[in-house]
Amino acid sequence: MGDSLPYVRVNGIRVAYRFDGKEGAPVVTLSHGLLADYRMWDPQVDALAARFRVLRYDIRGHGASDAPDGPYSFEVLDADLVALLDALEIARTHFLGHSIGGMIGQRFAACHPGRIGRLILAGTSATTPVASAWEGWLDTIRRGGMQGLVESMLDRWFDDAFRAAHPEEVARVADAVRASPAAGFVGSAHTIMALDHMPLLPRIKAPTLIIVGAETRSASVADGEAMRQAIPNARMIVLPNARHFANIEQTAAFNRALLDFLGS
């Protein structure tokens, strides 16, 4: 769980959020990845808050937001985001999403073109990534709870060199996995297992930046290239020496790419 956060009640659940940066500045909304919470964006906040009003939120099933049982869908996750923006009186926002957050961003940009400025998709895809792995992960949850996922996810997300050099950052990610509600993971996993946003991508009119870690073992470079080709005004950068969490592994390069794109 995150720190004590304010929340709004939308679509029958509480959605927790946090603002940083100056009131009145252009808004950039940050949507975290699977098994994370709003704090995964800590390495980006100072850089962004100097120029933007930064809105971070915990998506349904994660962090300090509610984690109801039952199937989720990207239609529901998109509706949660729109209702949050409405409640906070945000008419238009830039959007940065990682993993499942990027999947939400694809639908948001395609379905609400008047509400988005620029779109950044990091470590994400428009179709189910690593499709063969999800049933095994769900079985792990059924047998042993969230703790059973920690080591396999860390091995997938970070290489040995990064884990040895940055144990505190890796430990924070591990803590977020352990703290994730099982119901939230199950609901999100089934949603991702049904993902096919490729038909939506040509409808995205927002300038779009796709960021992929060169060594990723999750959403692949090929997944990023498929999105780049399908989104009319998209470009892609591949960050070396990074897997799934390029924003943590290559913070300086990631932040530079964000600021250059948002300022262009």
Image (cartoon, helix red, strand yellow):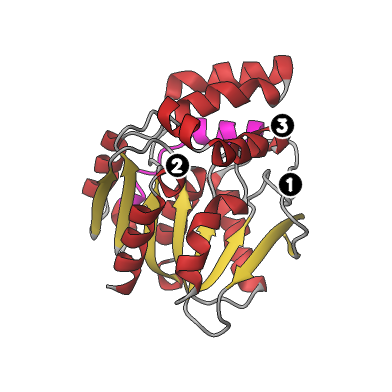
N-term-proximal mark, 1 vs 2? 1
**Chain-order first, disc 3 or disc 1:** 1
Which secondary structure lies at badge 2? loop
- Closer to us: 45 or 60: 45
Q: Nearer the viewer, residue 167 or 120?
A: 167
| Sequence order check, earlier mark of 2 and 3 | 3
Q: Residue at x 75, y 37 (%)?
A: 69
Figure check: 103 above or below 256: above
The three-letter code of the residue at mark 1 reads Met
Which class describes the residues within 10 Å of circle 2: few (<14), some (14-19), or many (20+)? Answer: many
Residue at left offset 25%, top offset 49%: 237
Residue, disc 3: 182
Which quadrant of the rendered structure holds the C terminus? bottom left
Disc 3 to disc 1, how far (Cα)?
13 Å
Q: Identify the residue at the far front of this view.
A: 165
User: Amino acid type of disc 2?
Assistant: Phe
Residue type for callout 3 = Ala
The residue that mark 2 highlights is: 245
Residue 120, horizontal then vertical, whole percent: 38, 57
Tell whether 132 sits left or right of 63.
left
Magenta-colored span: 185-201
**Residue 68 on the magenta segment:** no
Asked whether the residues under the numbered discs 1 and 2 touch, taking CB atoms below 8 Å apart as contact, a structural biologist would say no
Numbered badge on residue 1: 1
Res 57 visible: yes
Measured from the top left, where is residue 78 in percent x and y? Answer: 55, 55
Mark 3, secondary structure of its residue: helix
